[in-house]
Each structure stands twice: as C-alpha cells, then as structure tokens.
Amino acid sequence: MDEVPIDTDNIRLGQFLKLANLIDSGSDAKAVIADGLVRVNGEVERRRGRQLAPGDRVEFAAHSAVVKAP
C-alpha cells in the first residue's frame, strides 16, 4: 500500500486515482469508477467527485493507496 501526499485538505476520487498512478487519465478514472471497480475504505464507490480526506484508502486493480495529509 502506498501513501500518497496531497497538497490540500481533501481531493476528489478521480484526481486521486491519477495522482496515485492507479490510472492513466481522467477518462480512465470515469470509466473504472462507473463500472464499480474502485473501492474507498472497503466499499464500492461510483462517484468520481467523492471527496477524500487524509486516511482514506483507495483500492483498484489489486493496488491500494492511502491519502496522506499535506
């Protein structure tokens, strides 16, 4: 599991997937989230705009990343 620092207090899920290098582009994020392939804190998340805060764990394709405080 990787810890990915963010520059702000929170970040949208789609942005975080790209920042954590779990996907290549915003359109890829939209597709994998809509297909129910992304989990946040163990639960399927289908909202690309979901706000993540430090400590949230994101899982996709057998990889996981945790949002780290700025």
Image (cartoon, rainbow, N blue to C red):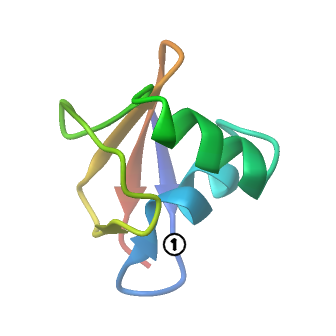
Residue 47 appears in which quarter of the rendering?
bottom left
Residue 44 appears in which quarter of the rendering?
top left
Asked if 23 appears above or below 1 in the picture, the reply is: below
Residue 52 vs residue 36, the one in the foreground: 36
Q: Amino acid at mark 1?
A: Ile
Residue 13 vs residue 4, the one in the foreground: 13
Q: Which residue is mark 1?
A: 6
Residue 4 vs residue 46, the one in the foreground: 46
- Residue 37 placed where, x, y %? 45, 25
Location of the C terminus by quadrant is: bottom left
Asked if 6 appears above or below 67 in the picture, the reply is: below
Q: Residue at x 48, y 40 (%)?
A: 34
Q: Residue at x 81, y 42 (%)?
A: 24
Answer left or right for 6 relative to 52: right
Mark 1 surroundings: few (<14), some (14-19) or many (≥20) residues within 10 A: some
Q: Residue at x 43, y 69 (%)?
A: 49
Q: Residue at x 64, y 36 (%)?
A: 22
Q: Secondary structure at mark 1?
A: loop
Location of the N terminus by quadrant is: top left
- Residue 54 placed where, x, y %? 28, 66
Answer left or right for 27 relative to 7: right
- Residue 60 placed where, x, y %? 48, 26
- Residue 69 placed where, x, y %? 36, 72
